[in-house]
Amino acid sequence: MGRPPCCDKIGVKKGPWTPEEDIILVSYIQQHGPGNWRAVPTITGLLRCSKSCRLRWTNYLRPGIKRGSFTEQEEKMIIHLQALLGNRWAAIASYLPQRTDNDIKNYWNTHLKKKLKKIQEGQSRDGSSLTNPDSVSRGQWERRLQTDIEMAKQALCEALSPDLKQPGGHQASTYISSTENIAKLLQGWMRDSPKSSGGSSILTDEQHSHNNKNKPKMDYGREEKNEMESSEAFESLFGFESFDSSNSDLSQSLSPDEASITIFQDESKPPHSQEPLSLLEKWLFDEGTGSQGKDCFSDIKLDENVDLF
DNA sequence: AATTTATGCAACCGCCCGATC
DNA sequence: CGATCGGGCGGTTGCATAAAT
C-alpha cells in the first residue's frame, strides 16, 4: 500500500507565520536539515501542513535569499529568461539562486509585465514591425543563445563566488542566512514598532523597508506579547557570532539541489519564443552583455554548449 | 482627514511527476 | 502493477500598505 496521508487538514493553521513558528522551523532544520517535510509538523509540534513548512523555508527562511528590490541586471535577466523559458519560474530562479521562484513570479506579475507592455506598446506605436519568431534568422538565434549562455554563466559565477563583487559593489551584504533573516526581521519589527523611535542601524535600507512593509502582514504585529521572548529566544538559539560560521558552513554545505544552477538542462530547452523581442533584445543586449566584462566562465564556448540542448 | 483605488507580496490551492509500498 | 504519497511547481487569492481623489 501507499504511504499514510500527508496531513489531515484538521487543526492545521493557516495564514502568516509568526516569529515563534519561524524559530521553531529554523531550529528544526538546523538540527535535521531541510527535507522530510512530512515529519516537520509532528516533530516540531507546528500546527502547519508540511507543504506550508516547506514553502516557508524555501521562500523565506532558506539561507542565501536576497530580499528587497531587484537590480536592473536581475530584471533584465528575468525578462530574458522568461522570453526564453516561459513562465517556468523555478527554472528561471535557478539562474538567480538568491531569488526564490515566488519572488521572481511576483516581480514579473507586478512589475515586469507592465514594463514589457509599455515597451511593446511603444514599439507598435513606432510602427516597427513585430518580429515573427519564425523568421528569426539562425544568426540572430545563435546570438541570442550566446547571450543566454553568457548570462547563465555569470549567474553561476556569482552564485559560486559569494565574495565576488558586482559592479555596484554592495551585493554581498544582501546575502544573509536564514537565521539572520529572522533575527533582523525580528529586530526590525521590534524597532519599528510604534513604541520605538530609534533607527535600526543594523538593517540595510532594503531590509528596513521590507520590514516596514511586512511587519503587519507577517502577523508579527499581533504577537506583541511575545516580542521579547521571541527575540531573546532567537538570539539564544542563533547568536550573531554563530551566524558567520554557520552561515558560511550552511551555504557551503548546501545540497546540490539548494545551490543548484541548472544551466541548460533538459527542462531549459529554449521553447519557440512567442514574443517579439526586437526592442527588448536591444535593451538587453546593450546593457546585459556589454558591461559584464570578463567572467569566470569565459572559456566556455557556445559550440560546447549547443550540445546540451 | 476620510475614503477609494492600486499595488505588492506572502501564502494557499491544485495539479503533476517520480518514488514508495 | 496499481494505489498512494511527498515534493515541486505555477497560478491565484487575500490582505496590508501606499497612493490618489
Image (cartoon, coloured by chain):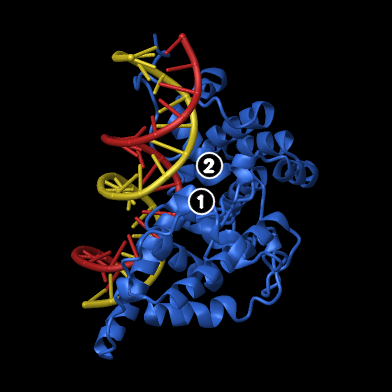
Chain colours: A blue, B red, C yellow
- Between B8 and A163, the one nearer to me in the picture: A163
Would residue A43 appear left or right of A11 to someone viewing this image? right
**Residue type indicated by callout 2:** Thr
Q: Which residue is mark 2?
A: A58
Q: Are marks 1 and 2 in contact (CB under 8 Å)?
A: yes
What x and y, as percent, mark residue A158? 67, 61
What x and y, as percent, mark residue A49? 43, 27
- Between A96 and A18, the one nearer to me in the picture: A96
User: Chain letter of disc 1?
Assistant: A
Near mark 2 (Cα within 10 A), the count class, few <14, some 14-19 or many ≥20, is some
Residue A1 falls in which quadrant of the image?
Answer: top left
Instruction: Find numbered disc 2 in the image and state the secondary structure of the residue it sits on.
Output: helix
Q: Is residue A201 visible?
A: no
Q: Residue furthest bottom?
A: A126
**Residue type indicated by callout 1:** Thr
Comes first in the chain, label 1 or label 2: 2
Would residue A157 appear left or right of A124 to someone viewing this image? right
Q: Which residue is mark 1?
A: A100
